[in-house]
Structures are given as structure tokens and as C-alpha cells.
């Protein structure tokens, strides 16, 4: 009886360790090509004024040519959850987190309201990441429209 409990306990610990290792390996694979930054995303965000903190997902974004690929942190999926094309992103506002959002987001986050193919979304990132993101948007090749408010 005790031996069975011990074996089950060790198997459970091994399973947890393998799960944590896979999380770390996945993040390492996402970040290996560089151009990544911590970024929370709220897809299909409500209009201005909703600071409930609901709908935010914590993730890592990666620049990949003319796209930003967004991966959830707490996922085993090898593919990005969302892909944002540079030519389809329109920045509509910029603000500090307010209300319950301050608890849902990283402490130094700035919220950037955007439209992507008609869908309102919000990205929350650090000031440094925001500067890089806006520079990436404005560095579009000639002939592409970029809308930065």
C-alpha cells in the first residue's frame, strides 16, 4: 500500500516536472530567433471605459517579418494564438491601465488600443516594448499604409 502511494507520488512529481520543462522549452524555442517581448492581449476588446480587467491573456509576442505573432504563456501550443499583420494594424489610442486592469497586467504596462481588420484589440506592454512596437509599425516598406495615432 505504502509502496503504491510512493510510486504514484513520484509519478505525479515527474509529470509536473516534465510539464514545467515543456513550458520552459516552448518559451525558449519562441524566443530563440529574437525580437520577442512580453505582451498581454485582449482580443475583441470592449469600447473605451471598460477597465474590468476581464479578457486579458498574458503572452509573448514575436516579430516575424511584417507580422507580430502572439503566443499565450500558459499553453503548450507550438503555433501562435494570434497573428497581426503590420499593414492591417491601426493604433487608435494609448492609455495607462485603470481600475482592475492594474491587477491583471504587468506593473509597468501601457495599454495600446488597436484595430486589426475591423476587430478592436488592446495590447499591454512595457514602455520599451511599446517604443519598439511603434517604431516597427512606422518602419513599414514604402507603399504600405500605417496608421499610428
Image (cartoon, rainbow, N blue to C red):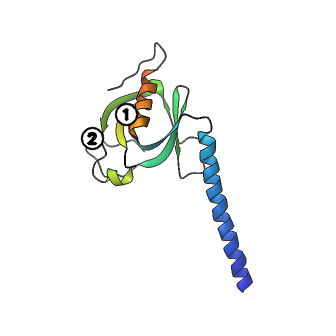
- Percent position of residue 41, x then y: 43, 43
Q: How many marks?
A: 2
Return the residue at label 2. Answer: 48
- Percent position of residue 48, x then y: 27, 41
Q: Give the position of the N terminus as an image quadrant.
A: bottom right
Question: In this view, which residue lies farthest toward the bottom?
Answer: 1
Q: Give the answer, above or below, for where 105 lies relative to 18.
A: above
Residue plotted at (37% across, 33% down): 114
Instruction: In this rendered view, identify the residue nearer to me: 75 or 108.
Output: 108
Which of the labelled discs sits on residue 96, or is there none? none
Instruction: In this rendered view, identify the residue nearer to me: 92 or 63.
Output: 63
Tell me the SS state at disc 1.
strand
Q: Give the position of the C terminus as an image quadrant.
A: top left
Q: Give the answer, above or below, for where 21 lies relative to 126.
A: below
Which of the labelled discs sits on residue 114, or is there none? 1
Residue plotted at (32% across, 43% down): 46
Tell me the SS state at disc 2.
loop
Amino acid at each position: 500500500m505504502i509502496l503504491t502511494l510512493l510510486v504514484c507520488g513520484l509519478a505525479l512529481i515527474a509529470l509536473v516536472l516534465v510539464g514545467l520543462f515543456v513550458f520552459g522549452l516552448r518559451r525558449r524555442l519562441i524566443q530563440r530567433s529574437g525580437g520577442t517581448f512580453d505582451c498581454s492581449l485582449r482580443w475583441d476588446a470592449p469600447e473605451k471605459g471598460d477597465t474590468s480587467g476581464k479578457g486579458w491573456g498574458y503572452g509573448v509576442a514575436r516579430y516575424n517579418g511584417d507580422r507580430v505573432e502572439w503566443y499565450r504563456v500558459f499553453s503548450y501550443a507550438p503555433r501562435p494564438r494570434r497573428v497581426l499583420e503590420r499593414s492591417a494594424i491601426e493604433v487608435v489610442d494609448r492609455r495607462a491601465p485603470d481600475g482592475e486592469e492594474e491587477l491583471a497586467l504587468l506593473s509597468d504596462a501601457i495599454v495600446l488600443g488597436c484595430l486589426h481588420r475591423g476587430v478592436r484589440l488592446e495590447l499591454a506592454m512595457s514602455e520599451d516594448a511599446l517604443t519598439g512596437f511603434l517604431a516597427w509599425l512606422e518602419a513599414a516598406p514604402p507603399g504600405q499604409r500605417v496608421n499610428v495615432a
